[in-house]
Image (cartoon, rainbow, N blue to C red):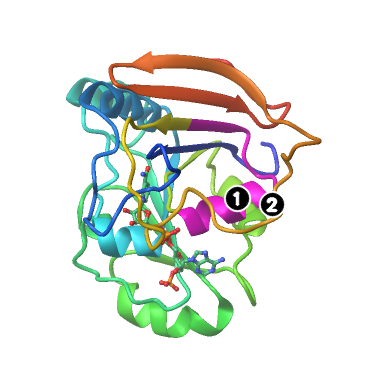
């Protein structure tokens, strides 16, 4: 098994590069694209989101289609992938959908000093993983590989995207552009400030462009491991 999972970062952004506004789970995409994302989810071993996304969107992070869930179980897998989150504060509600929806393993990474409190709070509903003095996404990825995760889907938000991208841990970027503006600089952006491996001198490789109704899907190959499936 490679030292880290094949990592696919999937998100949708407004025309001005935001992930949403103050409303929880603002739909940037459309039904056809949600269904495409469901297919991608079904193809992964684990789905990861940041703690702010867990708190504000309360996502279930499950495969929605019954047929896809059945295909997974026929292959000896759980109906939906494992769920992963990361937190420093540990302020997550054990009753939120992340923890209660789906009979799948839930992993919460936190820094060593926060493990005890986080375990007291979430231990009954999740596996709390000591991420070291400070949680680094490379180490987290390697730990996931050790736990059998071969294919990881990172689904936001911007703080998590920034770390995966700037640490050069993403093999494939699937970026959906919605046909409207958010126009509020307080809204979360696709990424925050950082030093990214792709810049004017080193451009990312655009692998494909696909129109899905009123949105467009851009796929970028960000590493030599990119698989055009
Ligand atoms: N359009 C889309 O496709 C899409 C997808 C997902 C989310 N979103 C939106 O994105 C917004 C949230 O994005 P966001 O950038 O504000 O937050 P985020 O990335 O979802 O979560 C950030 C939080 O994760 C934890 N975290 C991240 N890195 C960490 C590390 N190295 N060590 C320890 N903890 C770490 C911290 O949690 P603690 O604060 O608990 O310490 C941090 O505050 C929401 O509005 C959501 O609706 C949009």
What residue does disc 1 label?
A: 164
Report the residue at 81% width, 36% height from top: 201
- Please tell me which residue lies in front, 100 or 202: 202
What residue does disc 2 label?
A: 167
Q: Is residue 228 magenta?
A: no
Q: Which quadrant of the figure has residue 140?
A: bottom right
x and y, in percent, of residue 135 in the image = 59, 68
Q: Which quadrant of the figure has residue 119?
A: bottom left
Name the residue at the right extreme: 201
x and y, in percent, of residue 58 in the image = 23, 57
x and y, in percent, of residue 145 in the image = 60, 45
Q: Is residue 227 visible?
A: no
Q: Is residue 167 magenta?
A: yes
Q: Give the range drawn in magenta.
A: 158-174
Check disc 2 and report its element: helix, strand or loop. Answer: loop
Quarter the N terminus occupies:
top right
- Please tell me which residue lies in front, 119 or 85: 85
Report the residue at 31% width, 36% height from top: 180
Neighbor class of circle 2 (other Cα within 10 Å; few <14, some 14-19, many 20+) is: some
Q: Is residue 67 visible?
A: yes
Disc on res. 142: none
Left or right: 107 in relation to 165: left
Neighbor class of circle 1 (other Cα within 10 Å; few <14, some 14-19, many 20+) is: many
Report the residue at 38% width, 15% height from top: 211
Quadrant containing ligand 1? bottom left
- Report, in whole angstroms, how far the alpha carbon at label 2 lies from the one at label 1: 5 Å
x and y, in percent, of residue 71 in the image = 30, 20
Ligand 1 under 8 Å from disc 2 Cβ: no
């Amino acid at each position: 098994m490679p030292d880290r999972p094949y990592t696919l970062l999937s998100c949708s952004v407004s025309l001005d590069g935001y992930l949403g506004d103050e409303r929880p789970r603002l739909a940037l995409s459309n039904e056809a694209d949600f269904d495409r994302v469901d297919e991608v989810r079904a193809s992964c071993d684990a789905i990861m989101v940041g703690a702010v996304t867990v708190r504000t969107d309360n996502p279930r992070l499950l495969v929605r289609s019954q047929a896809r869930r059945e295909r997974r179980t026929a292959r000896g897998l759980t109906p939906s992938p494992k769920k992963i989150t990361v937190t420093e504060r540990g302020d997550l509600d054990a009753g939120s959908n992340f923890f209660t929806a789906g009979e799948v393993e839930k992993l919460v990474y936190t820094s060593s000093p926060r493990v005890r409190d986080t375990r007291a709070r979430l231990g009954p509903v999740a596996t709390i993983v000591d991420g070291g003095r400070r949680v680094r996404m490379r180490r987290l990825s390697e730990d996931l590989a050790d736990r059998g995760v071969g294919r990881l889907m990172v689904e936001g938000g911007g703080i998590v995207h920034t770390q995966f991208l700037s640490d050069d841990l993403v093999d494939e970027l699937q970026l959906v552009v919605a046909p409207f503006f958010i126009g509020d600089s307080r809204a979360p952006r696709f990424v925050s400030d950082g030093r990214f491996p792709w810049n004017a001198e080193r451009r990312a490789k655009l692998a494909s462009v696909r129109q899905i109704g009123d949105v467009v899907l851009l796929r970028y190959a960000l590493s030599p491991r990119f698989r055009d499936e």
